[in-house]
Image (cartoon, rainbow, N blue to C red):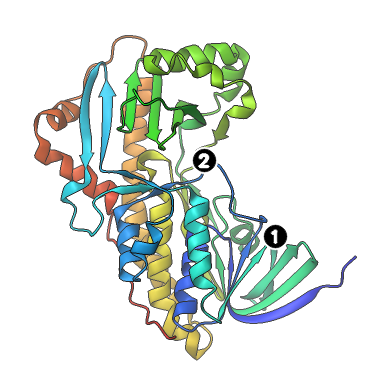
Amino acid sequence: MAEPRTLTTTCCIAGGGPAGVMLGFLLARAGVEVVVLEKHADFLRDFRGDTVHPSTLEVMHELGLLERFLERPHQELSEIRGKIGGVESVVADFSHLPTHCKFVAMMPQWHFLDFLADEGRKYPTFRLIMEARARDLVFEGERVAGIVAETAEGPLTIHADLTVGADGRRSDVREAAGLKVIDLGAPIDVLWMRLGKRPSDPTASLGRFDPGKLLVMIDRGDYWQCAFVIAKGGIDKIKAEGLPALRRRIAAVAPELSDRVDQLATWDDIKLLTVTLDRLERWWRPGLVCIGDAAHAMSPVGGVGINLAIQDAVAAANILAAPLKKGRVADATLAAIQKRREWPTKVTQAAQRLIQERIIVPVLNEDEALPVPLPFRLLQRYSLLRRLPARAIGMGVRPEHVRTPKSH
């Protein structure tokens, strides 16, 4: 067995997702020594959060990176459409947002993370270690003093003035820290898949609601990224009915896809997202703070999870950069991160729960024709109202702005 290795840094971040890499980049940019751990060998994962909302694009603008960022492959979504009971309408119109980018950038998450990592490496205080998974924490009494990681080269112990858990909804860090999770409940799961796109297809992304069926089609240029919503724990029933039955259900809700549902050749072509909606009661303990999905797992409703994670990272960097350059971070500073980001999290999760319980679950349980809800009819009739969901989705609650200095 390889001998344990050790290193020392100012801030060690577990998790190389949007929250972890963005926080690592911002701190390194401010002159803080930081180590980011990513458990995989690369960022290539399919069906991760690919929606980069205007709030995140505004952060890229504030960093002076927007033009270079948008050179990466992406599609631009200026509106979201929905179709209920044969009635179609624009649900959210981003064209009036007070941001530099009035669209959602649909970008594979690996491009987003590769971009941030490349920018981070320009700073001498940034270090990203791939194939390194946080397995345990180092303690000095009651205070967290670092991470024990499993790496390709063997065990690695990292001593840090501050440890950050950004390792996702099944966070090893928050479990090792003994932080209490509040489960808010999620009555749905999602089947992700991709189907070919033809030149004759519509170009707008669309959510389709039919009795017992809900399909979201996201335009990815040369293919449709599709989300078929099912009842929580319903995957066994779906598989028991067989793949042909699932193909028929998809074709029924989106007839234009009926000539290509056979592209779903095996169950390997379909990825199950087990939806979780939860948050930590307390996001921190001495020497440790959690952000992103590790602090609050979001529903896929609205596609806002990645953007809340980025907002957490920006707020955390704003609060932490100066104290970290001086030494250990006080408990009150860590509590300030939760205080700053907990309210936006609670409001967003409350909205997601409402949509899940009042709209999605009734659709999945409906056997007869769907009535078109009054809010949907109002959105269809009054274009001005479409700005409200656009602001909620595109900018979120209390968008953050970059306050950290650039030290190099």
Q: Is residue 76 above or below residue 363?
A: below
Q: Is residue 407 above or below residue 212?
A: below
Which quarter of the figure has residue 262?
Answer: top right
Q: Nearer the viewer, residue 319 or 198?
A: 198
Check disc 2 and give the amino acid type: Phe
Which quarter of the figure has residue 12?
Answer: bottom right
Q: Which residue is under mark 2?
A: 47
Residue 387 can be seen in this image: yes
* Residue name at image x 75 percent, y 62 percent: 150
Q: Nearer the viewer, residue 7 or 110?
A: 110
Q: Is residue 380 above or below residue 284?
A: above
Residue 363's x, y, as percent? 35, 21
The reply, left or right, for residue 367 in relation to residue 237 is: left
Q: Is residue 251 above or below residue 58?
A: above
Residue 170's x, y, as percent? 59, 50
Residue 304's x, y, as percent? 37, 48
Point out the image quarter for the N terminus.
bottom right
The reply, left or right, for residue 90 in relation to residue 310 is: left
- Check the image and name the residue furthest to the front: 199
Secondary structure type for disc 2:
loop
Q: Which residue is under mark 1?
A: 131
Secondary structure type for disc 1:
loop
Q: Judge the density around disc 1: few (<14), some (14-19), many (≥20) Cα neighbours within 10 Å.
A: some
Between the residue at mark 2 and the residue at mark 1, the CA separation in whole angstroms equals 20 Å
Q: How many numbered marks, from 0 up?
A: 2
Residue 215's x, y, as percent? 40, 25
Check disc 1 and give the amino acid type: Glu
2 or 1: tag closer to the N-terminus: 2
* Residue name at image x 37 percent, y 60 percent: 342
- Check the image and name the residue furthest to the right: 1
Residue 295 can be seen in this image: no
Point out the image quarter for the C terminus.
bottom left
